[in-house]
Amino acid sequence: MEQVQQVSVPQVTVRVHSAVGTAVVSWCGDPKESDGQHHVEWTVAEDLDWGRNIQLSALAEAGLGQDGNQVILRGRIDISNPDTAVLEIADSLIVFDLAAPLPGNIAAEWVEIRVAAASVFLYPFQL
């Protein structure tokens, strides 16, 4: 990761580099430790809503990217719990709350999720 120059934003933002892509998100650890390599926990403060911020993906591969103010997460979706969905991106899992139940026929399918970059937070995690 590398710290990104901020313009009147109280939260530290970082460009996270992973094996599947990069994106600029909020860092919730010690600002002095934002540069460097870390194990992190991803938190997304945006509920999934089918057709609005989640859809089937045309690509069957894990991905992380950015399109303007949106972070793009691509992976396989697990919808076995009716209240949450778990996105598997490479070796990472991200748990999402649901605005409404997702279609039952998308279990284990490749999906693309687009969320506001301001709703994505990284927390340092010790293994």
Image (cartoon, rainbow, N blue to C red):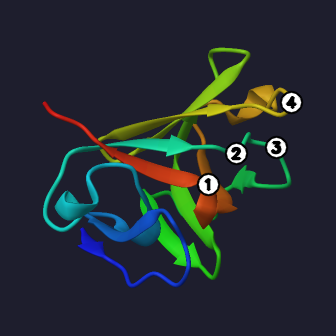
Q: Tell me if I can see residue 57 in this picture.
A: no
Residue under the image location 47 percent in, 51 percent down: 121
Mark in the foreground, 1 or 3: 1
Closer to the N terminus: mark 3 or mark 4? 3
Res. 34 mark:
none
- Report the side of 23 relative to 82 (left or right): left
Closer to the N terminus: mark 1 or mark 3? 3
CB atoms of marks 2 and 4 within 8 Å: no
Q: Amino acid at mark 4?
A: Ala
Mark 2 to mark 3 CA distance (whole Å) = 9 Å
Q: What residue sits right under mark 2 in the picture?
A: 46
Mark 1 to mark 3 CA distance (whole Å) = 15 Å
- Compared to residue 68, the image places residue 117 above or below, namely above
CB atoms of marks 3 and 4 within 8 Å: yes
Mark in the foreground, 2 or 3: 2
Identify the secondary structure beneath mark 2.
loop
Residue under the image location 64 percent in, 30 percent down: 107
Closer to the N terminus: mark 1 or mark 2? 2
- Compared to residue 119, the image places residue 106 above or below, namely above
- Compared to residue 34, the image places residue 87 above or below, namely above
Residue closest to the eye, 35 or 63: 35
Res. 100 mark:
4
Q: What residue sits right under mark 1 in the picture?
A: 119
Q: Amino acid at mark 1?
A: Ser
Identify the secondary structure beneath mark 1.
helix
Res. 49 mark:
3
Q: Amino acid at mark 3?
A: Asp
